């Protein structure tokens, strides 16, 4: 066992630190090929990961790269570098530590390839890019250890799959690489272990002491939460009071738009001018860095943030976490709460702020689950093939490769262990030729097979384009926002949001209200606005579905006769629901119909999670279209789908006929908007659609056309194309989540209760203010469009 | 009827829901910006491998319009091919298909910025055409009574944007007919400034819908 070198012992002793048992254990088992450490935030997890590296490097004998550290966040890589550099410098260790992310300068990145540091801290995307260079084998020549931080977060996404494929490449370059995974508490450690280890090698799992249970409560406010809406503006005074009572408060939101609105309101009420910052993924890098730096210096009393601050960044003195809006997932809640009070063995403190009365119910259910240590999670599907396609292209960038060797390499990644050779060859064929049934492109291939059997890029210049499009983060098209006349961008908004703006519209970005002036060179130009109330920013963060476990808890809560655990206002609200309508039940589907804003609305309560409720929206609107009800659109939340139409729903039960829904899924479902959205993401990952072009997209928008056109074309002329098969599989699991629709149909078995109301019910009210409405382009909308067109022509005197 | 009827320079025209312009008295069918061979050109130039089906998709739609109107003359208003090499590399089946569509009628290829030279695909090749009181050319000029394309206009009416015709007292600008074509918002600066007061847009799709172009 490598003892802690004397220099370390005296360094620890001088600070009165003792090494934690799990840190000792990591050091003792440092030679194992794969180790997974599960530890709560604040448990010295990162140090546990790095101690063996520091010990091995302490004598200064190692040449070149020794340890690669991968984190899901750029900020985390930079943060860990600072945290490591300080003790390394103080102990006088001869260790060079650098980070490398998309934000690192080009010259520095080039130098890092030729002369890598001992410890390189990076992200999955930057690592994938590094492996794409011809000199990768030289860069990684000395590599001994890989540390994957926050592996529980990476294991949930394609970024993790890309990372594991990159590690399989590294393994081929430097056999015997040791892997270490650092994870927060998860429901299934074994799944993470298999994800981490080189298949079929074993992976030992170490558990650190989980520490005391966190102190989580709902925040008590004097003001009543509203029936609907997501801003939680009512809680602003109570939140400010909490900020004043604590040193540093993190205020988490589920979406960027909510964070912006809340931050704005908080500022308006901040009469003592407390230093409060905002941090989310849409903000310009300079702005994020400024907030991060101010936070590190302990200058901020509060930070309004989203998931971009969600992962293990050590922000020091955070002593309170506030979660605005219901946590959609208990595991995420626990991890967020771990942000607070970064001291081992001290309970962390968190307060939940429901944005409306329904969220009060959701928060209570989440609290009960957290106290019961009932973590939720969904098992992951096998390794996604769009990521594999990108991996094949990245491999080709680095030089000629042998297909069979690459296939075996890929199968050494746990998620791809069951990949068949036929499926691999499909992906290779897609990368080489496009994989079309119509072989029109024999002359125009991306990859060609040489006489010696190796595959290579047909045109080596293609490498540049492939490198520019590396990554699996499915951002919608984002456009920079900048102040007219000023150079610095304020941040980014979704292209669809930008397209909806008219000159004069105001919206929030970076906590300030700006006025839309126009679109120039694909940048949104804005000026400072003096308005107090902006047009709401609808650029979104990721919306998570409430997990199945949490949905079931919520349904059980609703089913109680009385609600002594809920605040009186919410209990009264639920009582009102029972009086004017009914309470949704686990084994029945409740449908409420009412007229709102002059149009028939029907609300279908399924408690199946947002994705499944959205799918239900598509299935039901199709059934309604066939029934001549002329649906116009729908919106889904985690518990219900609200559909509006030109004709009212009078008999909903037949709409739910399982065979017809299943039939719809098989026959026409592929042409809907959700499928196209899924296609767009994975076709971009697989390299069919390029997100970034070498020359900025300045040439004018008529040059580009929507991925929907490609999807429709493939569906018509090449329905068995690999991209469509992957789209269908992925959508049914993810964005569409038909398994939960099926689960809903199974548990309700055609028991549909229909209530016709003269007013909006308490439970339906939140849906009226929900974002993310999905329009239905059917006869109803055609009718409305024709009417609107005729009216506009008449008003203009043109008809 | 699924077209918007209007008059330009005294001529009766129909903006069809398909995106084609129909001049019934002259039995003239006009389509613009087919961009045939776009996927081939992209593959050749950048290595991107888009689904190679846009020629088929576009010709199917053109064939349907020809079947519906039985024109005496078909005018392809420029950018019919994504570039001249794309025209050269059309497959045998696609060339035969074009020949079949041309049989028994006059066929005019107007030159566009993407396809400035003659093509060996039957029909006549012209910089512009003046017929039945109207001038057909690819990019609009200040001339009155002009039919042009080039800009791929599109417009949204309470939903996703659709390709549209732009019509004022002096000219009509056609939407792109090709399968792989994007669009330029009709309300954007360059397009809006081309159109005079009282201009309308005719959205294509299931129905041809006329709306004022607005400010």
Image (cartoon, grey):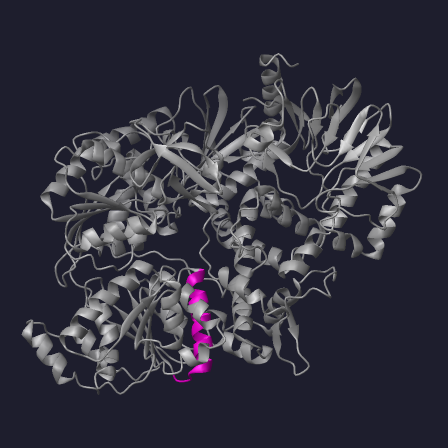
Residue A507, horizontal then vertical, whole percent: 36, 33
Query: What is the total number of numbered labels drawn onto the structure image?
Result: 0
Whether residue A616 sits left or right of residue A120 in the image: it is: right
Quarter of the figure that contains the N terminus of chain A: bottom left
The residue stretch that appears in magenta? A158-176
Q: Is A262 rendered above or below residue A488?
A: above
Residue A741, horizontal then vertical, whole percent: 49, 47
Q: Is residue A220 visible?
A: no
Q: Is residue A161 magenta?
A: yes
- Residue closest to the eye, A305 or A723: A305
- Residue closest to the eye, A348 or A268: A268
Q: Is A599 rendered above or below residue A104?
A: above
Q: Residue at x 14, y 37 (%)?
A: A273
Q: Residue at x 32, y 80 (%)?
A: A66
**Which quarter of the picture shows residue A160?**
bottom left
Whether residue A95 sits left or right of residue B186 in the image: it is: left
Residue A731, horizontal then vertical, whole percent: 53, 52
- Residue closest to the eye, A447 or A203: A447
Considering every residue shown, the one lying at the far front of the view is B142
Q: Is residue A548 visible?
A: yes
Whether residue A404 sits left or right of residue A763 in the image: it is: right
- Residue closest to the eye, A480 or A191: A480
Residue B164, horizontal then vertical, whole percent: 65, 31
Q: Is B184 rendered above or below residue A503?
A: below
Quarter of the figure that contains the C terminus of chain A: top right
Considering every residue shown, the one lying at the far right of the view is B104
Q: Is residue A724 magenta?
A: no
């Amino acid at each position: 066992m490598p003892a802690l070198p004397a220099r370390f012992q005296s360094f620890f002793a001088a600070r009165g630190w003792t090494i934690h048992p799990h840190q000792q254990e990591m050091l003792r088992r440092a030679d194992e090929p794969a180790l997974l450490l599960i530890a709560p935030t604040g448990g010295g997890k990162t140090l546990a990961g790095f101690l063996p590296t520091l010990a091995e490097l302490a004598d200064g004998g190692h040449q070149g790269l020794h340890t690669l550290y991968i984190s899901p966040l750029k900020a985390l890589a930079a943060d860990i570098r600072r945290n490591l550099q300080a003790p390394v410098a103080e102990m006088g260790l001869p260790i060079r530590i650098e980070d490398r992310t998309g934000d690192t300068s080009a010259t520095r990145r080039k130098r890092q390839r030729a002369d890598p540091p001992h410890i390189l801290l990076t992200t999955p995307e930057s690592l994938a890019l590094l492996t794409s260079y011809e000199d990768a084998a030289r860069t990684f020549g000395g590599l001994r250890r890989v540390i994957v931080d926050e592996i529980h977060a990476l294991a949930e996404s394609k970024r993790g799959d890309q990372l594991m494929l990159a590690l399989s490449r590294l393994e081929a370059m430097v056999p015997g690489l040791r892997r270490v995974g650092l994870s927060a508490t998860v429901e299934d450690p074994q799944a993470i272990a298999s994800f981490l280890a080189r298949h079929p090698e074993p992976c030992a799992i170490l558990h650190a002491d989980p520490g005391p249970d966190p102190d989580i409560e709902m925040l008590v406010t004097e003001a009543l939460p509203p029936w609907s809406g997501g801003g939680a503006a009512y809680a602003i005074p109570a939140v400010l009071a909490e900020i004043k009572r604590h040193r540093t408060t993190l205020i988490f939101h589920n979406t960027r738009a909510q964070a912006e609105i809340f931050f704005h309101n908080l500022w308006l009420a901040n009469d003592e001018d407390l230093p409060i910052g905002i941090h989310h993924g849409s903000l310009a890098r300079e702005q994020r860095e400024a907030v991060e730096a101010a936070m590190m210096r302990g200058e901020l009393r509060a930070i309004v943030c989203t998931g971009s601050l969600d992962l293990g960044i050590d922000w020091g003195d955070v002593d309170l976490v506030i979660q605005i809006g219901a946590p959609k997932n208990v595991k995420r809640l626990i991890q967020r709460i771990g942000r607070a009070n970064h001291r081992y063995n001290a309970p962390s403190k968190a307060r939940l702020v429901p944005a409306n009365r329904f969220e009060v119910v959701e928060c209570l259910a989440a609290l009960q689950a957290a106290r019961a240590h009932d973590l939720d999670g969904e098992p992951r599907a096998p390794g996604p093939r769009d990521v594999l396609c990108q991996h094949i292209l990245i491999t080709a960038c680095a030089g000629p490769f042998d297909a069979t060797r690459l296939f075996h390499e890929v199968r050494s990644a746990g998620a791809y262990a069951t990949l068949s050779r036929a499926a691999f060859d499909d992906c290779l064929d897609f990368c080489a030729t496009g994989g079309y049934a119509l072989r029109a492109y024999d002359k125009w291939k991306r990859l060609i097979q040489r006489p010696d059997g190796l595959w290579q890029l047909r045109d080596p210049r293609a490498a540049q384009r492939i490198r520019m499009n590396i990554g699996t983060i499915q951002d919608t098209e984002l456009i920079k926002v900048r102040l007219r006349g000023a150079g610095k961008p304020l941040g980014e908004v979704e292209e669809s949001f930008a397209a909806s703006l008219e000159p004069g519209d105001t919206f929030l970005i970076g906590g300030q209200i700006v006025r839309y002036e126009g679109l120039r060179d694909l940048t949104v130009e804005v000026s400072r606005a003096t308005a107090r109330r902006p047009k709401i920013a609808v650029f979104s963060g990721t919306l998570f579905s409430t997990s199945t476990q949490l949905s079931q808890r919520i349904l059980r809560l609703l089913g109680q006769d009385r609600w002594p655990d809920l605040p009186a206002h919410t209990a009264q609200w639920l009582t009102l629901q029972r009086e004017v309508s009914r309470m949704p039940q686990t084994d029945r589907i409740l449908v409420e119909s009412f007229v709102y804003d002059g149009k028939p609305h029907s609300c279908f309560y399924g408690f199946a999670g947002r994705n499944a409720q959205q799918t239900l929206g598509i299935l039901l609107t199709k059934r309604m279209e066939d029934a001549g009800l002329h649906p116009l659109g729908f919106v889904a939340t985690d518990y219900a789908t609200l559909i509006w139409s030109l004709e009212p729903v009078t008999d909903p039960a037949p709409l739910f006929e399982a065979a017809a829904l299943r039939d719809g899924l098989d026959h026409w479902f592929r042409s809907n908007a959700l499928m196209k959205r899924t296609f767009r993401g994975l076709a971009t990952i697989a390299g069919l659609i390029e997100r970034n072009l070498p020359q900025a997209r300045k040439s004018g928008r008529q040059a580009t056309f929507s991925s929907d056109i490609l999807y429709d074309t493939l569906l018509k002329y090449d329905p068995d194309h690999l991209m469509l098969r992957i789209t269908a599989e992925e959508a049914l699991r993810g964005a569409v989540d038909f398994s939960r629709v099926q689960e809903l149909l199974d548990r309700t078995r055609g028991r549909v209760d229909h209530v016709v109301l003269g007013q909006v019910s308490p439970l339906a009210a939140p849906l009226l203010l929900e974002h993310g409405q999905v329009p239905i382009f059917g006869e109803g909308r055609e009718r409305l469009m024709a009417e609107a067109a005729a009216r506009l022509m008449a008003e203009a005197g043109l008809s | 009827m699924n077209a918007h009827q209007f008059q330009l320079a005294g001529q009766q025209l129909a903006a069809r829901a398909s995106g084609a312009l129909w001049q019934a008295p002259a039995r003239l069918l006009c389509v613009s910006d087919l961009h045939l061979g776009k996927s081939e050109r992209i593959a050749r130039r950048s290595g991107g491998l888009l689904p190679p089906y846009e020629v088929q998709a576009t010709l199917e739609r053109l064939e349907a319009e020809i079947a519906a109107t039985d024109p005496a003359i078909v005018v392809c208003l420029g950018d019919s091919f994504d570039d001249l090499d794309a025209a050269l590399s059309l497959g045998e089946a696609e060339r035969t298909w074009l020949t079949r569509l041309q049989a028994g009628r006059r066929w005019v290829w107007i030159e566009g910025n993407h396809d400035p030279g003659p093509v060996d695909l039957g029909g006549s090749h012209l910089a512009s055409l003046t017929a039945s009181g109207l001038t057909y050319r690819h990019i609009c000029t200040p001339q009155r009574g002009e039919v042009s394309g080039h800009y791929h206009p599109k417009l949204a009416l309470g939903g996703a944007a659709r390709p549209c015709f732009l019509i004022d007292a002096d000219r009509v600008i056609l939407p792109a007919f090709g399968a792989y074509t994007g669009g330029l918002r009709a309300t954007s600066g360059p397009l809006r400034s081309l159109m005079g007061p009282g201009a309308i847009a005719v959205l294509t799709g299931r129905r041809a819908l006329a709306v004022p172009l607005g400010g």
